[in-house]
Image (spheres, grey):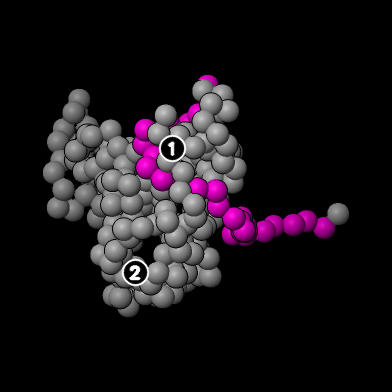
Amino acid sequence: MINKTVKNVQEALQGVQDGMTFMLGGFGLCGIPENAIHELLRLGVKDLTCISNNAGVDDYGIGLLLQKRQVKKMIASYVGENAEFERQLLSGELEVELIPQGTLAERIRAGGAGIPAFFTPAGYGTEVGEGKESREFNGKMYLMEAWLKADFSFVKAWKGDTAGNLIFKGTARNFNPMMATAGKITVAEVEELVPAGELDPNMIHTPGIFVQRIFQGEKYEKRIEQRTVRTL
């Protein structure tokens, strides 16, 4: 069985260059590839197109890349937690493609499945549909949406094995599994890395065939976007 393990995040991100398109897993700050983002920050690569459900927050996640002006274009669904993102958008410094969340998920899944386009009713008759082909099916109008693919997909899992098989935990099983299928090179960082054969095959969410590089991450902060407490 092929061993997909690399020593560290530096080795995992070999080949990353300016102008590339990246997918970054996560939802809010849950399940984001923290180690990969910090390495992208250290490398200083720029003119990036980032595909992610959201743009992190001002001082964490993709928000760190935005602060350093490393991102040229964001393809995302929700960006409401990031004031710097809003500023760059309104000032014209950042290209933005906002996509309904379900459409974003399906475009990524289509990229991984080799489906170049599909039809969805979401966004028809709105700005989302401007310039896109539409067609009627059973009396209802649909938009044609194209797949999304990336040069690198960066995902974060709870547990993985040396063959690249991944298990996601709880809400971290969001955009990560589908993004793992849609990158030319998929880099998985995991909290726990085990030998091949130790994972229960019935529990695996992403088969190792989709993963090219895997490493055990470190120093995960797992930040919470908005902490709400109550007085007892």
Whichever of labels 1 and 2 marks the residue nearer the N terminus, that label is: 1
| Res 67 quadrant in image | bottom left
**Pair 1/2: label in front:** 1
Find residue 69 and report its horizontal and vertical position in percent. 37, 75
- Could you tell me the amino acid type at mark 1? Asn
Q: Vertically, is 142 above or below 190?
A: above
User: Is 170 contained in the magenta span?
Assistant: no
Q: Which residue is mark 1?
A: 3
Find residue 211 and report its horizontal and vertical position in percent. 39, 40
Residue at 46% over, 44% down: 5
Q: Which residue is mark 2?
A: 45
Say which of 14 and 174 sits in front. 14
| Prevailing secondary structure class for the magenta stretch in the rendered image | loop
**Residue extending farthest bottom:** 91
Residue at 50% over, 70% down: 58
On residue 32, which mark appears? none
- Could you tell me the amino acid type at mark 2? Val
Q: SS for tag 1?
A: loop
Say which of 8 and 21 sits in front. 8
Q: Vertically, is 70 above or below 51?
A: below
In this image, 8 relative to 144: left or right? right
Q: In what quadrant of the picture does the N terminus appear? A: top left
Which residue range is magenta in the image? 202-231
Residue at 52% over, 21% down: 202
Say which of 138 and 52 sits in front. 52
